Image: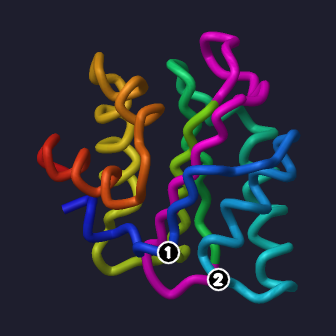
Amino acid sequence: MLSSLFAPDALRLDLSGTSQDEVLAELVALLGLDGPDAAILQKLLKRRESLGSTGVGRGVAIPHTRCALVDGLRLAFGRLPPGIPWAAIDNRPVHFFFLIVAPPLEVSNEYLPVLGRIAQFVKEPDVPERLAGLSAPEDFFALLREKGL
């Protein structure tokens, strides 16, 4: 279940960044890495964005990378109500961020399936509106469970 992969403290419904770098830093901070490791991870995510935006449209971005600084698949979710430009596929601002970080080699091989499940989840007609209406982290987990994730 996708809901079991998010640590309860890896969610923020009130991100405050005004640039891609600031938002990536806030998302990385949710994983609890120390300063130097967080900086390395942020650089890897920025490099991934330079290959092609992770903005999948409908106000959603799914920044993701593989990184030896984590020992297992790590997920975080952040919401930025005002949204920011992210070079998304539909050229609209991004408000919802699903961060995925996995080690270079993972026994469970969950990285790509999780990326796919999140991409499918955010394509559901009611999901962006439901994410916008979350009032507490518990609501996020309830939405995932309702959608069978």
User: Viewer-proximal residue, 128 or 40?
Assistant: 128
The residue sitting at 29% across, 16% down in the picture is 125
Per the image, label 2 sits on a secondary structure element best described as loop
* Color theme of the render: rainbow
At label 2, the amino acid type is: Gly
How packed is label 2: few (under 14 Cα within 10 Å), some, or many (20 or more)? few
Query: At which x and y percent is residue 86?
Result: 75, 29
> In the picture shown, does residue 5 fall above or below 83?
below
| Count of numbered badges drawn on the protein | 2
Which-is-in-front pick, marks 2 and 1? 1
Residue topped by disc 2? 32
The residue positioned 51% from the left and 49% from the top of the image is 98
Quarter the N terminus occupies: bottom left
Whether tag 2 and tag 1 are in contact, CB under 8 A, the answer is: yes
Q: Circle 1 is placed at which residue position?
A: 9
Q: Position of residue 55 (x, y in %)?
A: 62, 30
Is residue 15 placed above or below 131 in the rendered structure?
Answer: below
Is 9 left, or right, of 66 in this rendering? Answer: left
Left or right of 145 on screen, residue 116? right
Magenta residues, start to end:
68-94
Lower position in the chain sequence, tag 2 or tag 1: 1
Q: Residue at x 36, y 43 (%)?
A: 118
Q: CA distance from mark 2 to mark 1?
A: 9 Å
Q: Position of residue 47 (x, y in %)?
A: 81, 51
Task: Examine the structure image and report whether residue 70 is included in the region drawn in magenta.
Answer: yes
SS assignment at label 1: strand
Q: Nearer the viewer, residue 88 or 139?
A: 139
Q: Residue 94: x and y, percent?
A: 65, 28
Amino acid type, callout 1: Asp
- Asked if residue 29 lies in the magenta stretch, the reply is no
What residue is rendered at 34% in x and 23% in y? 123
